[in-house]
Image (cartoon, helix red, strand yellow):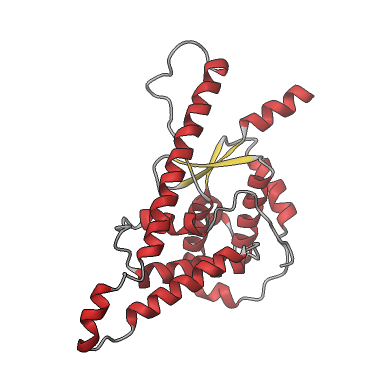
């Protein structure tokens, strides 16, 4: 597949690490480095599979994780135990960076929320929102990749070896997805993958979704953190188009 996507929504390696820590409810100050390294490398491999543009910093972090993992797995003699106890934990520098980055992210989130609240003062009606109003969380790129990974694992093994005619293209899939949104205001990502006939269509569907996100035609949300990913048309984009027409 020669379709290559370069995304503006791509988070960095620290975002991915924080995502893995929070998703599995890990202690950020005592990261199980072997487990996190394995998961991190799996995400990198999925990005390669999708032919996504992987920034060099992702590969640098992969090397850092492997280096820390190797240091922690090396056998230690009893004579060297006391010396090692006085040395810094190999994970400590990484933990410091993650904690600092997490603080910046939380601060940025608070500022963004204030910005949105300020905008709502001018765009929403004066009455308070109803009690039944839906509340959504913004999903991340890594939530999408997690759902994509799960969908690939659920494809029957025999389909991986089936020779399939090249009947799916990203351009056609984008058209099909936009057509679906004419009748359905929101779609579950898992349902889109379930409709796919084979592994190739799952990959093409995922790439089409990424392209629509880049074009700001759709938004991805969750009803709860790490919950099912839902896809919705970007109402701001639709409103903007309607005003131009």
Counting from the top left corner in percent of width and height, residue 13 is at 51, 60
Counting from the top left corner in percent of width and height, residue 30 is at 29, 63
- In this orientation, does residue 198 appear? no
Which residue is at a point 38% across and 52% down the rendered structure image? 99
- Vertically, is 233 above or below 58? above
Residue 155 placement, left or right of 181: left
- State which quadrant residue 71 falls in: bottom left
Which residue is at a point 43% across and 55% down the rendered structure image? 19
- In this orientation, does residue 182 appear? yes
Give the residue at the far right of this rendering: 245
Counting from the top left corner in percent of width and height, residue 202 is at 59, 60
Observer-nearest of 241 and 95 = 95
Give the residue at the far top of this rendering: 126
Residue 245 placement, left or right of 14: right
Which residue is at a point 40% across and 74% down the rendered structure image? 68
Counting from the top left corner in percent of width and height, residue 35 is at 36, 70
- Vertically, is 137 above or below 55? above
**Can you say which quadrant of the picture contains the C terminus?**
top right
Q: How many marks?
A: 0
- Vertically, is 163 above or below 228? below
Which residue is at a point 29% across and 58% down the rendered structure image? 27
Observer-nearest of 77 and 145 = 77
- Vertically, is 19 above or below 57? above
Residue 147 placement, left or right of 208: left
**Can you say which quadrant of the picture contains the N terminus?**
bottom right
């Amino acid at each position: 597949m020669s379709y290559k996507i370069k995304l503006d929504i791509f988070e960095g390696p620290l975002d991915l690490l924080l995502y893995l820590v929070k998703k599995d409810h890990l202690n950020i100050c005592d990261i199980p480095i072997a487990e996190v390294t394995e998961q991190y490398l799996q995400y990198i491999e999925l990005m390669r599979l999708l032919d996504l543009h992987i920034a060099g910093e992702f590969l640098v972090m992969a090397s850092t994780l492997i280096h820390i993992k190797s240091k922690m797995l090396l056998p230690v003699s009893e004579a060297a135990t006391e010396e090692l106890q006085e040395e810094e934990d190999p994970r400590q520098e990484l933990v410091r960076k993650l904690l600092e980055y997490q603080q910046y992210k939380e601060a940025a989130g608070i500022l963004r929320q204030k910005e949105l609240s300020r905008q709502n003062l001018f765009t929403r009606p004066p009455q308070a929102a109803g009690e039944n109003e839906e509340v959504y969380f913004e999903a991340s790129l890594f939530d999408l990749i997690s759902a994509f990974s799960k969908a690939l694992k659920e494809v029957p093994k025999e389909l991986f070896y089936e020779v399939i005619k090249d009947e799916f293209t990203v351009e056609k899939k984008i058209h099909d997805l936009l057509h679906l949104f004419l009748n359905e205001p929101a779609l579950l990502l898992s349902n889109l993958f379930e409709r796919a006939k084979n592994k190739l269509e799952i990959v093409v569907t995922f790439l089409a979704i990424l392209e629509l996100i880049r074009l700001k035609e759709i938004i991805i949300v969750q009803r709860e953190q790490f919950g099912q990913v839902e896809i919705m048309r970007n109402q701001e984009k639709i409103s903007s188009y309607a005003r131009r027409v």
